Amino acid sequence: MTKAAGGDARYVARPRTTGRPLHVLLAALILAPVWATAVHAAPPMLYHSANDDGVAAPGIPQELGMPMVTLFLYLDAGAASTGTGTTCVDGDGDELCGWEWALLVNGGADIQGFVPDPAQDIVSRVSATELAGIGGNAVTGQLGPIRLGEVDLNITAPVWSVSMQTGTAVTAAFTLTNIPSTEIAVPEPGFATALGSGFMVLGLLARLRTRSVSRKFLLVILLLLLTPGSAVAQDADADGVPDGIDNCVYSANPLQEDFAGLYGPPGDGIGDACQCGDVNSDGAIDLLDAATYERGLAGLLPIDLDQDKCSVIGNRLDCDPNDRQTLRETIVGSGAGIQPVCQAANAVPPGPSRIVAAGDSITQGFSADCTCNAGFFGLICLLCPAGGDQPQHSWFDGSSLGNSFYALYGGPGSGITSSRVSVSGAEMTSGGNQFSIQVDNILALSPVPDLVVVELGGNDVCNRGCVDAASCGNPLYDDATWTTAIEAGLDKLVGFGHPTSIPIGGTVYLLGVPRVQDLYAAGVAKQTGNSSVNCDSFRDSFDVCEIATLNAPMSGEDLPTRLAALETRIPRYNEIIRDLALAYTTNSNGRNPNGIEVVTDYVNESIASVGTTPFGENEINGGDCFHPSVAGQSTLAAGAWRSNPR
Ligand SMILES: [Ca+2]
Ligand SMILES: [Ca+2]
Ligand SMILES: [Ca+2]
Ligand SMILES: [Ca+2]
């Protein structure tokens, strides 16, 4: 997704009136000033500081044309601190409380990479020709030169330039201001003059969504006039607009206002009343929402975080740092994007009546309460890891856990029933208890559960002999194998090419593959200073997940090599789960004609989920030094519940 080129008036403060005539709106868009207030002494300036010292050179910095150029990006907020008012509320200084910008590289230069300044909390998006970033501090604000990071350019022809296309910042008075568009760098004289970028701007504009506010509005009015009996049509929010054409099916908005969408006007077909992410309720999703989110999470004014519009990811109707992160990624044009999961956009689904878990030994609570495997009590201890399944400690419905997934629903007293088809040793992919076979067992239950939670994948990693297909005959599964295994189970659950399915209205909730790559270090930490535990010895003797725990070469690959590969491979498995969930739940893959909800908690490596939960010494048991301890099971339960859709 690409932003519009700057210069419009989309950030003008907009009164919360309803039914504003269209011509007034258009006039406001054309005539209104860019800045609603003028508290800022000078506009913030984004520039390249040739010496990386925060000093902007006079004029446009010129760089030798070939072969590689590094630009040091800075944003200068200005030097005057707030004297009257409170910074990031109603301050009068130069502090910036948030910023986002997009650079465009024109002509003979490619972006090789961007290294954000480690002192900044930046989310960025990088392609060969574009670099966008979002960050800032909406709690305290920032003064003076703010170092953003380094951009490496590969110069391929003498004529090139780097220019700032769009940028906005949140002022000390908590209003939006534009960061002026400027040239950031050009070649030294004698090479060439900067390219005009008009054709690129045209390209950007052409890619904007062009759904018309007026057409949609008129269509609604027309249909209302033509269908006096429209009471017979479904109208979930009883606002007179039938569900089929209502731009907010679950929020009453009879006038269908659609001022804006991502970045500002024009409307995007989603009504203001249910625009997920628009937490300050001005119709637009922009930097001001990200800054409002940051302050709202910190409990600071202005606390006008619209609770109905703040859950933009993860399916749970709440407002948490994951939602803010996703909002920032969306504004910068990266990540999975905003899902319409907010309360205003969705009817709250009813709770499930029967829940079931597919899984492996983790869900079976294997060895969870074992605390020793060596020393004086070694023999007694060995009985523990051999003791096997301890479902009473299962994260899913273990009776010993006050916060099991089931307990968080209220347990047996809730009227919900719970069961497990999980089997120790099961894989997602192969073997007699693989995912699709567990699905057969789910569909054979009576009644068939309406919430299926899946936690598989650990054994798919642990049972492999090497990470590189060139090293052994049973390497880590490739993308296609992993994908096919998940599809085989999901197809049955949703009834695609299969005679039965879970009930329509049911949900499949896929949890990520746990961080198997943490287990070795967790075991070393657990045995350190504890004579009752020897993880190295136990795991080596009993071949416990050797690919991740054997501190010796396997198939010619040493442990660091294998762990490094898992560090990328497991996130890849989780990305595939995420992408499949989206493809099924939207039916974009054509495999879910009944519209059964398929969701996951995995977004990416920087957003907390089961698949990103670190396993430390307290999260693994002291018996096999592999499976979750009781405490680890509690952690899993909390992680699974965090994004539970129902
Ligand atoms: Ca309606
Ligand atoms: Ca509505
Ligand atoms: Ca909208
Ligand atoms: Ca907004």
Image: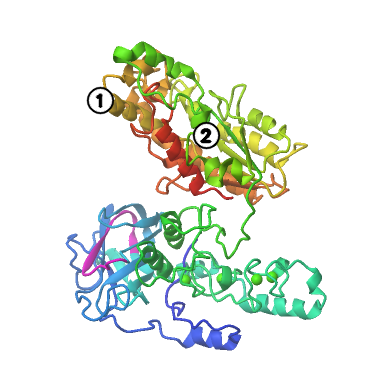
Indicate the quadrant where residue 542 lies: top left
Q: Residues within 10 Å of mark 2 (few under 14, many from 20)?
A: some
Q: Nearer the viewer, residue 115 or 169?
A: 169
Residue at the limit of the structure toward the front, as seen here: 413
Residue 156 in the image: state x and y as whole percent: 35, 54
Ligand 1 is found in the corner quadrant, namely: bottom right
Q: Nearer the viewer, residue 368 or 25?
A: 368
> Can residue 33 be spotted in the picture?
yes
Vertical placement of 468 versus 23: above or below?
above
Badge 1 element: loop
On residue 528, which mark appears? 1
The stretch drawn in magenta includes residue 146: yes
Residue 618 falls left or right of residue 64: right
On residue 399, which mark appears? 2
Q: In the image, is the residue at mark 2 within 8 Å of ligand 2 by its beta carbon?
A: no
Q: Which residues are magenta?
A: 139-161
| Amino acid, disc 1 | Thr
Vertical placement of 12 versus 541: above or below?
below
Residue 260 in the image: state x and y as whole percent: 53, 73
| Amino acid, disc 2 | Ser
Badge 2 element: loop
Residue 625 falls left or right of residue 447: left
Main SS class of the magenta portion in the image: strand
Residue 595 in the image: state x and y as whole percent: 69, 50
